[in-house]
Amino acid sequence: MKIRQRLTRMTLLVVAVTTVSMAAWSLTTHRKSLEEAVLLRGETIVAALAGDGRYAVQLFDREALDNISVTAIGAPDVVATAFLDAGGDLFLMRTREGMASPPLPDPLRNELRSDHPLVRRTHRGWLFAAPMMASHAPSAEELLLGTGGGEQQVGTALLWLTDDGLRAALQRDTEGLVGITGAAILLGLLVAHLLSRGLVRPMGRLTEGARRLSEGDLDHRVPEVGDAEVATLARTVNRMAAEIQSHQAERERRAKELGRANDFLESVFDSSPTGIAACDTGGNMTAFSAAAEVLTGLPKRQVLGRSVAELPDPLATLLGRAVAGEAGSDRLEEGEGEEATVVELHAVPIRGERQAAGGLLLLVDRSERNRLERQLLQAQKMESIGTLAGGIAHDFNNLLTSILGNVSFLRTFDELPTDVEETLGQIELSGMRAAELTGQLLAFARGGKYRQEPIDLHRLVRTTVEMVRGALGHAIDIHLDLDAPTACVTGDAGQLQQVLTNLLVNARDAMDDGGWIRVGTRVGEGETVELICQDSGTGIPAAVRERIFEPFYTTKAVGKGTGLGLAMVYGIVHNHGGSVRVDGADGEGARFTITLPLCDDGPTVEASAQAAEAVVVGGGRRVLLVDDEAVVREVGRRILTRIGFEVVTAEEGEAAVATFHREEGRFDLLLVDLTMPGLGGREVVSVLRESGATVPILLVSGHSEEGEVERSIACGANGFLAKPYTVAELSAEVTRVLAPAGRSTTA
């Protein structure tokens, strides 16, 4: 191909140089002749203007000069004519129609000669100037001096010629020469083509094929024509191109498969929640997944390619041991409590065919699992403590029922001695204090929620804050931010009020020098509302936060706290289907967030409290009293007998059912303990209702599992009475249960 190109270029160069040289010489010669013709014409016309107009200028005959100018303007390429007087001032100018008047030249007097006109080059042509000479008779003074006579300049004739005609002629000549040059070049190409048809063309094709093959154009094929040697060489080149093309296609196919596999592996690599890091045998980092970035806080772009030794410990140590062929494990821990992060590190060698090929490090986030384990352990511990507290409270309530019941029974008698009355008062005060502590234990054990009614949480907050505002002191400011649009919950208003009261009192105790307490509500997740109590006190250390809801755990001085306040809060809230959490580090104040489920119905207006005075309600009616505790049966029998009932007792559920069926129709009321060995209170109610009995049944208990009271009432019980109880409380509840029956006593 290079031979053909060289031949063609040489031919074209010779033709082009010859043609262009001849054309340039011809154009130069022709232009010169055309310019000479134009200059000659201009000099002739301006000389005629000067000769014809000299007398008209002397006579100031403008009309004659105008006629002369019109004649001159009719000549080709003439743009304008003008006549100047002897002083060089314009006397007359005439321009071709449609042309603007050209500017007058500078004074020409010193440059004009009478024997030859003056020529100047302008922007688009030439300016010709010729003096206008005329003879004159000498004056007397000139005759005396021997001077004067002859000719003198009376004015100047000006002529402007354009070079448009010259340009047009040159353009026509140039176009003709270009055509001739093109024809010459085509002729040269034809000659080169004819010369290359023999040897040059086949060799050129072969050379072009080899070049395109070397540039990667494997689809090109060399025509297998020409002499045998050239055709054989062309076939060899084509066969080589086909083989290279086949190998390249296979390589591209494998490269695409490898690329897809690498992309998939990289996606899997970065999608893994387990962090993955790897290095080669030289200790240079070759892989670092997205999870590894998150777990270590090290940017991937700053890790890849770096030496393992530049990484922080224990990553560097583990990977270094893995490269050496030794597996190892460690862990990263940061923070404490619920905010703690724990990352387990496991390093192993990457095994090649015969030796270690690098090191692999796996980073596993165990933070959430550790948090769940701590929460599970805490929940199990709280559940165990709650079960224990519930059992203790149940036994205590049985004892307190005996104590307070007997005190209440004794007070029904008139004219007791003063010292006896005082002693009973002290016993009752101590018993009520013990009952209060037991109630707190029951609340923690999730056994003290007996009322289920819609409650306006905002109204409860305002009522509670007004009630305890005085006890908090003037140094503490209380702010209410009740922002939740809906704050209706289902539960026991008294217990929820006690929850908020305990939180407010605890907040006050944490601020010896005063501060602020903010109580607010806001929308929770799902169908819940959050009650928030936040203070500016001393805060709660992390170690204390983990045990803050345990019964009898307190940081207050001896005699200033029982350790049951927050335990009761925990039990009541969880018993209402909610949750409670505490935030706030040491010195940053504390914030308790209580989450409660919303109810569908609106809050009800609380009924006025009923009188709790003891009244005689029995009127001889028969009541079956069932309790597994002998002291409780005895105090119950005394009280019921005192208020007018005929009492039959039973010590267990099976005996109660048997007694009822044996004397069916003779009992007006049943008082049944909820928790008994064997057949419990709820089972007694179910058995009697299934047998068709409609007698009113009042359940009594000192403790119950969550929801068991509601299930018992749903099975057919008519009411519930909590232990310990007094004569007044028992009388009021029995009156309420028996009131709808309206039955008379049968002796």
Image (tube, rainbow, N blue to C red):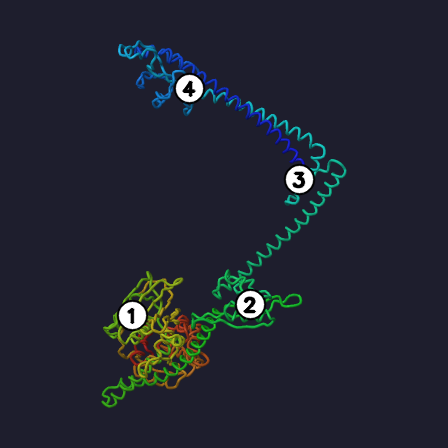
Q: Nearer the viewer, residue 17 or 541?
A: 17
How far is mark 3 from mark 4, CA to CA?
59 Å
The residue carrying mark 4 is 161
First in sequence, mark 1 or 4: give its number: 4
Quadrant of the rendered image containing residue 127: top left
Residue 311 x %, y %: 51, 67
Q: CA distance from mark 2 to mark 1?
A: 50 Å
The residue carrying mark 3 is: 208
Q: Position of residue 5 (x, y in %)?
A: 65, 36
Q: Amino acid at mark 4?
A: Leu
Q: Nearer the viewer, residue 369 or 528?
A: 369
Q: Please identify the quarter of the rendering in which residue 101 is found.
A: top left
Q: CA distance from mark 3 to mark 1?
A: 92 Å
Say which of marks 3 and 4 sits in front: 4
Q: Earlier in the sequence, mark 2 or mark 1?
A: 2
Instruction: Judge whether 18 appears above or below 617 on screen.
Output: above
Relative to 622, 40 lies left or right = right
Tag in front: 4 or 2: 4
Q: Which residue is mark 2?
A: 361
Residue 499 placement, left or right of 305: left
Q: Position of residue 418 (x, y in %)?
A: 22, 89
Pair 2/1: label in front = 2
N-term-proximal mark, 3 vs 1: 3
Where disc 1 sits, the SS reads strand
- Quarter of the image where one finds residue 486: bottom left
The residue identified by callout 1 is 517
Which residue type does callout 3 highlight? Glu
